[in-house]
Amino acid sequence: MDIKFLQAKNGDAILITFYDPKNTERNILIDGGTSSTYQSKNKNGKIENGPLKKIVRSLNKIDLLILTHIDDDHISGILKWFKCDRNAAQKIGKVLFNSGEILSEFFKKELNEDLEPIIKQINDTNTSTKQGIRFTKLISDNELWDREIIYTPLEKEYFGVKVTFLSPNINKLTLLSDKWIKDSKSLDTSAENDYKLTLKQHIEDDLFLEDKSIPNGSSIAFIMEYENINYLFLSDAHPSVIIDSLTDLGYNNKNKLKVKFVKVSHHGSKYNTNYELLSLIDTNEYIFSSNGDIHKLPHKCCIARIVNHNNNAELYFNYKSIPENMFKEDDFVDFPSFKVNVLENN
C-alpha cells in the first residue's frame, strides 16, 4: 500500500494506492484539500496546477472518494476539480459523503442549505450562491453515490480493504444537520503559532480543551486494514468520539489499537488530541498534514503531548517549513529520542 499526503496547504488530501485480491490496482482519495490543491493562479495571473490535478491526470480512476466533512480545506479541491473538468465524475467509482440532503432525509428535517456544496461552472456568470449545480446532484446523476449515511458503528470492505468507522456518531450528525451555520467560528483562530515555548514548557503549562467545531465533529474517521496492517485516519474528528468508538471496540490502555501510523486529527490542533486518546493507540508514527497557514496548525502543544506520551515518537510533516520553524535545540535535549521527518512524495 502506497500512501501520499499531498501538499494541500492547510488542508488534507490523501491518496492511497494498493492492489485488490484480484491484483487490480485501486486508488482511494481521502479529501481534496483547498481549491489551490487542484489549481490556482500565480501573481501574474498564470494558471498553476496543484498536486491534486497532477494526481488525477496521472490516474485511470479513483475507485473510492471519501469526503470526510464539509470544511473548505477538505472539500474545496474536489469542488474545483469538478468545476474545471466536466469529465471529473467519469474518473470516480464511488463517493462517501454525509451531505446535507441525506442528513435531512435521515432526520426528517428541513434541509440545511449550508451543507450542500455548490459547483459553479467556469462559464457561469451568475454570482448568486443559490445558482450552480449541487455537488450531490452531480454525484447522484452519475451514479457515484448510493446515498449511504456514514456513522458509528459501521464496518465496510472496499476492494479487499476493511474500513472500521470511528466517527461521526449520531449526535455529531444531529448537531451538523440542526445547528451549523457556514463560517461559524472555531477555537483555532490564533493569529500566531505557539512555537516560542519549548516542548517541555508546553507540557508544564498544558490544559486540554476539546474542539467545539460542529463540522469537525461530523468528520468521517476510520481504521483502514490492508494485509493485516492497520492505518488510522482521524480527519478533524473530536477525540471524545474516537475514544468512545475505540472503547466500544474493546481497546483500552492495556489492549491498544496497533497501527502503522495515525494521521493526527485536525492538522495537529491541541483541541483534537489528548492523552486519553494517545493511550489507546500503539504506534510510533504520527503524521501531520498542514503548511501552518490560516489557523497556525499544527500546535506545538499537541506535539508536546505526543512526545511526552511516547518519547520514541516519529513525527512526519508534509511541509518542511513546520519542523524547521517549530523545534528548538532544547527540545532535542529534553527529548533526545523523538525523530522529525519530512514526507517527500508531493
Image (spheres, rainbow, N blue to C red):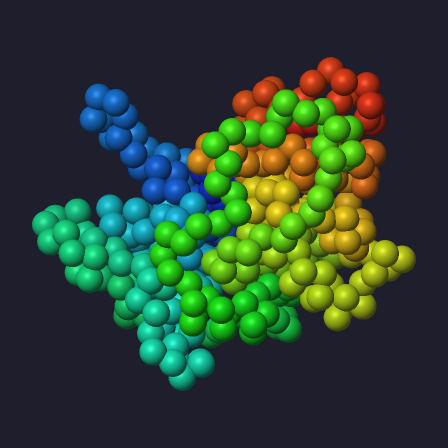
- Residue 86 position, x and y percent, is 23, 53
Residue drawn at the location 34% of the way across and 78% of the way down: 110
- Residue depicted at 80% across the width and 36% down the height: 308
Farthest left residue? 125
The answer to whether residue 343 of the structure is visible from this angle is: no
Residue at 39% from the left image edge and 38% from the top image edge? 37
**Residue at the extreme top:** 329
Residue drawn at 36 percent across, 57 percent down:
182
| Residue 309 position within the rendered picture, expressed as x and y whole percent measured from the top left | 81, 41
**Between residues 292 and 225, which one lies in front from this camera angle?**
292
Foreground residue, 265 or 282? 265
Q: Position of residue 140 (x, y in %)?
A: 32, 70
Q: Is residue 214 visible?
A: yes
- Give whichever of 315, 202 is nearer the camera: 202
Q: Quarter-wise, where is residue 115 in the image?
A: bottom left
Q: Look at the picture and state if 183 lies above or below 292.
A: below
Give the percent coordinates (x, y) of residue 94: 43, 64
In the image, residue 258 above or below residue 150: above
From the viewer's perspective, is residue 79 above or below residue 337?
below
User: From what the image shows, is residue 175 above or below residue 72?
Assistant: below
